[in-house]
Amino acid sequence: MAILLTGGMGFIGSHTAVELIKEGYEVIIADNLSNSSKKVLERIETITGVKPLFYEIDVAVKEDVMKVFEENEVQGVVHFAGYKSVPESTRIPLAYYRNNLDTALSVLEVMKEKNCKTFVFSSSATVYGDKNKAPFNEEMPTSTSTNAYGNTKLMIEQIVRDFAASWEELSAILLRYFNPIGAHPSGLIGEAPDGIPNNLMPYITQTAVGVREYLGVFGTDYDTPDGTGVRDFIHVVDLARGHVAAINYALKTQGVEAINLGTGKGNSVLEVVSTFEKANDLKIPVKLLPRRPGDIATSFALADKAKKLLGWKAELTLFDMCKDSWNWQKNNPKGYED
Ligand code: NAD
Ligand code: UDP
């Protein structure tokens, strides 16, 4: 009996593979390597002593997903596969709808046909939109977004709810991630963005390693303690453990639950920069810039539901996140490239 991780070679999937293996689960990864490297597999093996079975397939192709189910006993699926760049999704929205919706649909169709009843989905805090006030809780209304990426998350949440309404035995968890950063403390796996990073932490680490000249801080006039944006940064290892807890729970239950994975605490962009500087004894040159279109001032989770239902809460600090992000970047200045 195995847990299938679609997109399991990526940033969050690879950390989840490690934590699931540590808990004794057999892990299978299906990934087309569109945003990841095959080297991840051997790194997972170095950390855990186990090399997961790997299928290099496009998860949007149902027949290929079916093959994985026919060759293995899949107990549950964690569905990470998808495109994730907000700005890219505004440039090529159809590619985002095509890939993110088709991958989800083919996985759900195969699960139904093969009677696999446990599904965990990588959703996002972006579904809370710009009208709710933080802390965001799972009962708040969700809303469409100004970008196609966010809309695919909202649509897939709805698809899963409709599907669950038609199939009582399904157990589905919609995990709404806040801002995952950090890396495995071994420095062997981490976030390896292609090209110029959009997200804060990879931009900071690339500035520290000298690939970028300075960090642009987007917006200093928000209604926040220091005027810069506030986010709920969560260590990717904590997030990965949240998936183990979600799988443990989903294997025993039925129905759909949306659950936040966050720390419950917000930190500003400038707090992240100063913690990074302290944790690593480095200086990050910054340039204060205007707001980035589409950003909200403050986002952080109410993390009580995850504690109550899954018995999970984030343990690692912003200091840990900054240390581990830098440890990964300095050991792998070009990500997984040689
Ligand atoms: P990632 O890009 O590192 O991982 C996604 C993986 O999916 C990659 O390895 C990629 O090759 C694979 N993939 C994409 N399309 C595929 C396809 N058609 N068939 C097979 N494999 C495919 O991203 P991540 O940061 O690990 O995020 C994982 C999931 O979590 C994504 O769905 C993302 O939208 C979601 N999420 C991420 C964040 C974040 O900040 N990283 C926040 C909220 C939600
Ligand atoms: N940010 C920044 N400079 C960057 C990247 C991000 O100031 O180069 C800010 C951004 O405006 C937001 C916060 O950092 O306030 C987190 O942004 P990120 O893109 O990492 O995540 P988001 O919450 O937007 O998904």
Image (spheres, rainbow, N blue to C red):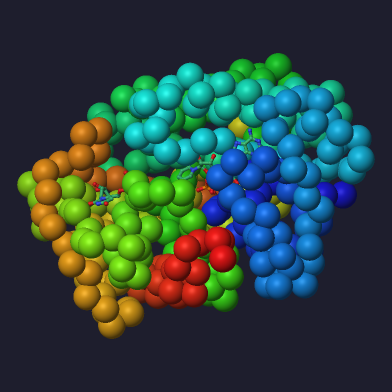
Where does the image place residue 220, in percent across and percent down from the top left? 10, 50
- Residue displayed at 50% across by 26% down: 96
From this view, report whether residue 97 is shown above or below residue 253.
above
- Residue displayed at 60% across by 60% down: 15
Quadrant assignment, res 82? top right
Horizontal placement of 82 versus 293: left or right?
Answer: right
Nearer to us in this view, 68 or 263: 68
In the displayed orientation, state which residue is furthest to the bottom: 281
Horizontal placement of 73 versus 47: left or right?
Answer: right
From this view, report whether residue 183 is shown above or below residue 121.
below
Horizontal placement of 219 versus 127: left or right?
Answer: left
Where does the image place residue 140, in percent across and percent down from the top left? 37, 32
Residue 87 seen anywhere in this rendered image of the structure: yes
Where does the image place residue 338, in percent across and percent down from the top left? 56, 66
- Residue displayed at 78% across by 50% down: 54
Nearer to us in this view, 257 or 226: 226
In the displayed orientation, state which residue is furthest to the left: 221
Horizontal placement of 159 versus 266: left or right?
Answer: right
Where does the image place residue 74, in percent across and percent down from the top left? 83, 42
Residue 115 seen anywhere in this rendered image of the structure: no
